Image (cartoon, rainbow, N blue to C red):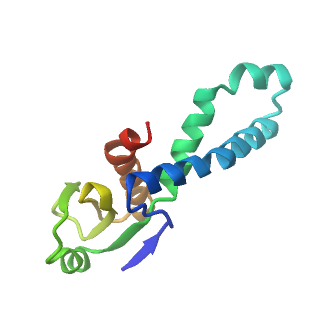
Amino acid sequence: MHTEGTLAPETPEAARSAYESCGPAAQTVVREVARAMDFDREEYAERVTGDVIATARDALFASLLEVSVGSREAFDAWLDGREETLERHGSEEVDFVAWHVVPFAGTVVATTYQNEEAAAVATLRRIAFAEHYREVLA
């Protein structure tokens, strides 16, 4: 079992604070990507909208969420005795699980996978963001 990511906000306020701190980084990333794509000032002003920056901030925040990864047996052992609600995604017929705890929602979001750990982690982060963080951050 191992953990990826660093963001595990305990409260909605901590989530909002972390989200706000992603704003400047998201803006810098978008600016540098636009520069690498050779956007001139006019194209930058036309195409890089507030929605583009907000999408980058959403993606950056989600990509930093702490995710634990391990075998189904390791997950079941970790889950044993916990009181959070489990939201399970994926198939019961595979060997590995990625999960993220949303403390302020009293929830563990988990997805299963067989071979593609990176894809499972990315999918889990998108699910957790959409189902538990987006509303708190709006």
* Residue occupying image coordinates x 25% and y 80%: 74
Quarter of the picture holding the N terminus: bottom left
**Quarter holding residue 33:** top right
Q: Nearer the viewer, residue 83 or 127?
A: 83
How many labels, in total?
0
User: Is 2 above or below relative to 42?
Assistant: below
Give percent across and percent down for residue 72.
Answer: 23, 73
- Residue 93 falls left or right of residue 11: left
Quarter of the picture holding the C terminus: top left
User: Is 5 above or below relative to 105?
Assistant: below
Give percent across and percent down for residue 27.
Answer: 69, 41
Give percent across and percent down for residue 113.
Answer: 30, 62
Q: Nearer the viewer, residue 72 or 29?
A: 29
Q: Nearer the viewer, residue 10 or 39?
A: 10
- Residue 132 falls left or right of residue 47: left
User: Is 35 above or below relative to 112?
Assistant: above
* Residue occupying image coordinates x 82% and y 19%: 42
* Residue occupying image coordinates x 36% and y 65%: 115
Give percent across and percent down for residue 50.
Answer: 62, 28
